[in-house]
């Protein structure tokens, strides 16, 4: 029975912290870890594992054990953790690269995009976060004005996938596409979709996304 | 009245918190969290989950409290575990069960069997969907609960000259507590700007920055959260003596006479709030309002699926 998804896992404690609707457990958890001298980024990465477990439990086609309410509350608690930990994560700004990041128009999901932004920032990238529900024109304007090395777009809804294609087309039409690498991610995105719209990379999660952004910068150097 | 909560996850926790702090705290005799991992992972001599429905008594956790209650409220418990409910009701010796559905995965797998079993035991059961659609009950215990929680009811005082809201009293809160949260933010809102007032309601109802907010399912194929938003907006509009969706339905029928239900739905669902009109976002809310207007003998729905004023 070792593969039973309902058995307690190494991340069960993180899951219970993330599912506390009052938000007190998440603050206590972060504070106690900080008090024990644990690196804020490490705490942040641990919580991501809990978040992933809830996501997997929600998507499990055999037995959905987490519900919509669990996703909402865990997302809210992750935001609380980000608010608490982000100021403590040193932004190295060591010139690794400039990234414009945002969630495409029609989609207001913030957490995945913010997690990726924090991950990049803690690795030395400089971030311009355009927010959520970002129209195509705003992405293009941000690329034109800031000349970033990388544009990162997130989409969690299949209905908003065409927006990513529109942004890439818009960059091409504006003559900006050759100067910026485009990485896409989010629940609705697949590697095949990323390829089909001409994105340079697909990030399954924030760690893979970070690795690909590092690769971009190495290639550029 | 003594209330016992059987719950799972933050959805249940939020409601228990609201009910306990919102007037019924003295009546709560206990709460127990029942998660699938407690039941559906075979341990020792306990067989796999397939036999849950055959011998549910055996699956009641050993640490389940020895207590009694009059009303059992089941919150966010996984649908696979619903076979336990009649046994738990018997163990608690309850007279009524309130089993709200705010997510498809909490729909009891054997709703009819459970209803039959409970009825046979002399226990009244209701399945409001979503919880905040509950507005009336023939059961005295659920009726007692409804004095505090269920479909929201607001008492609103406005400044007659400016149309600004002075004060909002929550006469009945939503079980999640979102109605109270919104009420606290409405002072100064302009009741002449119906579109903004309506949007404020829908946005705040699921604002996860608020202390309490709606946690119902929001999938467009099963839009319980959106329906809850409709109920909240219309409750506020009624409290402000503004035209609600029901009023809009009646106005349409007054103007157009007998109309097909589908045609009427096309007019009302998605209609923005404006002068003298206000629609709802979901078809579910429209259907609920239509049923209620029929029960109130204000409209007649014909066998040809048309609707007219009574």
Image (cartoon, rainbow, N blue to C red):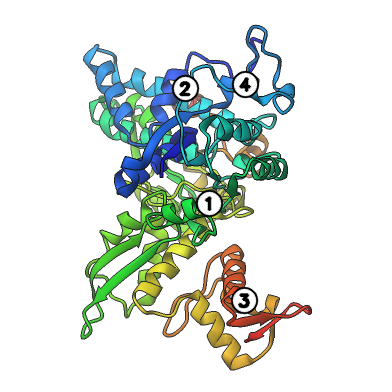
Find the distance from the CA under tag 4 to the CA under tag 2.
31 Å
Query: Do the residues at discs 3 and 1 belong to one chain?
Result: no
Q: Is residue A79 above or below residue B221?
A: above
Please give the residue where the numbered disc 3 appears in the rendered image: B294
Q: Position of residue B208 (x, y in %)?
A: 37, 46
The subunit carrying tag 1 is A
Q: Are marks 4 and 2 in contact (CB under 8 Å)?
A: no
The subunit carrying tag 2 is A
Query: Do the residues at discs 1 and 4 belong to one chain?
Result: no
Q: Is residue A114 above or below residue B141?
A: above
The subunit carrying tag 3 is B
N-term mark: 2 or 1? 2
Query: Do the residues at discs 2 and 3 belong to one chain?
Result: no
Q: Quadrant of residue B51?
A: top right
Q: Are marks 1 and 4 in contact (CB under 8 Å)?
A: no
Find the distance from the CA under tag 1 to the CA under tag 4.
54 Å
- Foreground pick, B143 / A16: B143
N-term mark: 4 or 3? 4
Please give the residue where the numbered disc 1 appears in the rendered image: A167
Label 3 crowd bin: few (<14), some (14–19), many (20+), radius 10 Å = some
- B91 lies left or right of B121: left
Is residue A210 visible to us here? Answer: no
As helix, strand or loop, the secondary structure at mark 4 comes to: helix
Please give the residue where the numbered disc 4 appears in the rendered image: B59
The label shown at residue B233 is none
Q: Is residue A96 above or below residue B141?
A: above
Q: Quadrant of residue A62?
A: top right
Find the distance from the CA under tag 2 to the CA under tag 1.
31 Å
């Amino acid at each position: 029975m070792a593969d039973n998804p309902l058995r307690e896992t190494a991340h069960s404690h993180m899951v219970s912290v993330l599912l506390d609707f009052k938000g007190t457990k998440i603050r206590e958890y972060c504070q106690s870890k900080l008090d024990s001298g644990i690196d804020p980024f490490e705490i942040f990465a641990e919580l991501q594992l809990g978040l992933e477990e809830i996501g997997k439990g929600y998507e499990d086609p055999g037995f959905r054990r987490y519900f919509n309410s669990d996703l909402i509350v865990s997302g809210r608690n992750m935001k609380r953790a980000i608010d608490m930990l982000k100021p403590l994560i040193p932004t190295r700004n060591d010139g690794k690269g400039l990234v414009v990041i945002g969630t495409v128009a029609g989609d207001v999901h913030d957490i995945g995009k913010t997690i990726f932004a924090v991950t990049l920032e803690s690795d030395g990238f400089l971030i311009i976060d355009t927010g959520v529900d970002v129209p195509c024109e705003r992405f293009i304007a941000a690329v034109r004005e800031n000349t970033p090395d990388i544009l990162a777009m997130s989409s969690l809804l299949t209905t908003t996938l065409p927006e990513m294609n529109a942004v890439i087309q818009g960059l091409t039409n504006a003559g900006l596409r050759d100067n910026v690498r485009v990485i896409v991610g989010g629940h609705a995105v697949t590697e095949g979709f990323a390829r089909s719209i001409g994105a340079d990379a697909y990030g399954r999660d924030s760690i893979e996304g970070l690795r690909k952004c590092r690769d971009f910068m190495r290639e550029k150097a | 009245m003594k209330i016992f909560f059987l719950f799972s996850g933050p959805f249940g926790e939020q409601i228990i918190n609201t009910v306990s702090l919102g007037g019924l705290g003295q009546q709560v005799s206990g709460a127990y969290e029942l998660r699938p991992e407690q039941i559906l992972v075979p341990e020792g001599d306990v067989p796999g989950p397939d036999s849950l429905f055959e011998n549910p008594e055996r699956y009641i956790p050993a640490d389940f409290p020895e207590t009694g209650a009059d009303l059992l409220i089941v919150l966010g418990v996984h649908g696979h575990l619903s076979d336990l409910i009649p046994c738990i009701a018997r163990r608690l010796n309850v007279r009524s069960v309130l089993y709200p559905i705010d997510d498809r995965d909490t729909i009891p797998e054997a709703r009819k069997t459970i209803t039959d079993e409970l009825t046979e035991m002399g226990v009244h059961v209701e399945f409001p969907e979503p919880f905040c659609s509950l507005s009336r009950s023939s059961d005295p215990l659920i009726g007692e609960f409804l004095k505090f929680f269920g479909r929201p009811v607001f008492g609103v005082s406005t400044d007659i000259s400016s149309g600004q809201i002075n004060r909002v009293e929550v006469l009945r809160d939503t079980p999640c507590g979102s109605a109270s949260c919104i009420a606290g933010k409405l002072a100064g809102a302009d009741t002449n700007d119906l579109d903004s007032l309506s949007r404020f309601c829908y946005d705040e109802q699921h604002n996860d920055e608020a202390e309490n907010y709606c946690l119902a399912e929001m999938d467009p194929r099963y839009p319980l959260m959106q329906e809850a938003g409709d109920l909240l907006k219309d409750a506020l509009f009624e409290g402000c003596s503004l035209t609600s969706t029901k009023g809009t339905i009646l106005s349409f029928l007054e103007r157009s006479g007998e109309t097909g239900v589908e045609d009427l739905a096309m007019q009302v669902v998605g209609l923005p709030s404006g002068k003298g009109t206000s629609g709802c976002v979901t078809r579910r809310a429209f259907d609920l309002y239509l049923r209620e207007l029929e029960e109130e003998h204000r409209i007649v729905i014909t066998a040809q699926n048309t609707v007219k004023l009574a």
